[in-house]
Image (tube, grey):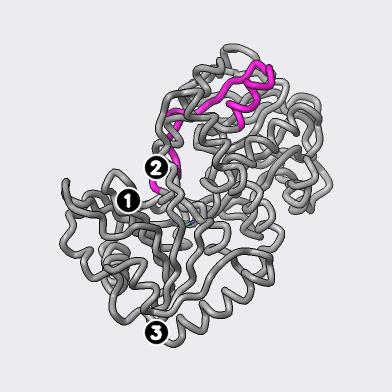
Amino acid sequence: MSRTSDTSDVLVVGGGIIGLVTAWRAAQRGFATALVDPEPGGGAAQVAAGMLAAVTELHYGEQTLLALNVASARRYPEFAAELTDATGHDLGYRRCGTLAVALDADDRAHLRELHAFQLQSGLVAEWLSGRECRRLEPMLAPGVRGGLRVDGDHQIDPRRLAAALVAACERAGVVFHRAWADRLTVVRDRATGVVTTDGTALGAGRTVLAGGSLSGRLAGVPDAVLPPVRPVKGQVVRLTMPEGRAPLLNRTVRAVVRGNALYLVPRESGELVVGATSEEMGWDTTVTAGGVYELLRDAHELVPGITELPLTETRAGLRPGSPDNAPLLGPTALEGLLLATGHYRNGVLLTPVTGDVMAHVLTTGELPAEARAFTPGRFTTAPALTEQSA
Ligand code: GLY
């Protein structure tokens, strides 16, 4: 038995930054909007470092995604200003640029290849010698062999971003249901909302599934449209500069150390975020001695001075990975059900463009040209909309 609570035009399932930005934009477009999540503003944004790294996180085979990443990076200044105007929140948006460095000959060769690929892709990155890298960042290890200066890759504080989006949603009239969505309701081949774990039925004209790594687990979603999203664990440590001390780094510093991607993101507040492991461990969010050891060992190799800093937090989160590392955006084959999920390594970067894309879809029924490649339909194989066996 379920109790009917209320009905909205748009119901967003999931209150991470992707769900929040979708709800905010939907409410701004005049839709009666609700969001269901036990803890809006939680999720992977509480762990993420917040790099806006369209250029330095370029990967082979992800050229289509690159266009969306670049489009979102371009929107960040206006998006951040609008969100701050709407809420009064400081987002920790810092246009500090990024330096990607190499510690040995192999890393250097890898970085040279990345540089060539960046230039072929029309991106801006400048090759620097080891000495030039250390001139920019004097706390780098003397062994740094060269690097890429990317002045266009910035950062934002994802925790502040999430808090601001919650405030923006509240001000725009989004109704929060602080509960877990238990099951999608489907009536005559149309999604009609969800039932929460406390048995409340939330009806909706359109339901947007934006549950991050949990998006593939909502009961009641037919197999044919269930998003193929999996959790990819990332462990992160946070160090803090003692008050009054000059920061160790002026910009984000990245490297690949023994095959592991490493980044150090210095905030104006004095926090230094060091991340991240990438582990296919299912739903495990344990912080392990090995994970923390490897991050600190590699970070120490890059910036020896970090060992003096207080270690203030260790945490693990789950990236919502998709089969092609790109998000799933827009309508599904089930009428009334849309997706905004699978943002994997780029959720923070893709927040502005996702909000705009989802607002466009909700208003017109169609994906805008820039997002057509990210239709959930690219993974739809089974023709029948048979309900998922719970
Ligand atoms: N984008 C950084 C990460 O996923 O670790």
Q: CA distance from mark 3 to mark 2?
A: 33 Å
The residue indicated by pointer 3 is: 104
Q: Secondary structure at mark 3?
A: loop
Q: CA distance from mark 2 to mark 1?
A: 9 Å
Q: CA distance from mark 3 to mark 1?
A: 29 Å
Please indicate, yes or no, whether residue 238 appears anywhere in the rendered image: yes
Residue type at mark 1 is Arg
The N terminus lies in which quarter of the figure?
Answer: top right
The span shown in magenta is: 22-47
The residue indicated by pointer 1 is: 315
Please indicate, yes or no, whether residue 258 appears anywhere in the rendered image: no
Q: Nearer the viewer, mark 3 or mark 2?
A: 3
Numbered circle sitting on residue 27: none
* Labels 3 & 1 near each other (Cβ < 8 A): no
- 128 lies above or below 362: below
Viewed as shown, does residue 65 lie left or right of 351? right
Q: Nearer the viewer, mark 3 or mark 1?
A: 3
Residue type at mark 3 is Asp
Dividing the picture into quarters, in which one does residue 103 lie?
bottom left
Q: Position of residue 28 (x, y in %)?
A: 64, 21
Q: Secondary structure at mark 1?
A: strand
Q: Position of residue 285 (x, y in %)?
A: 37, 51
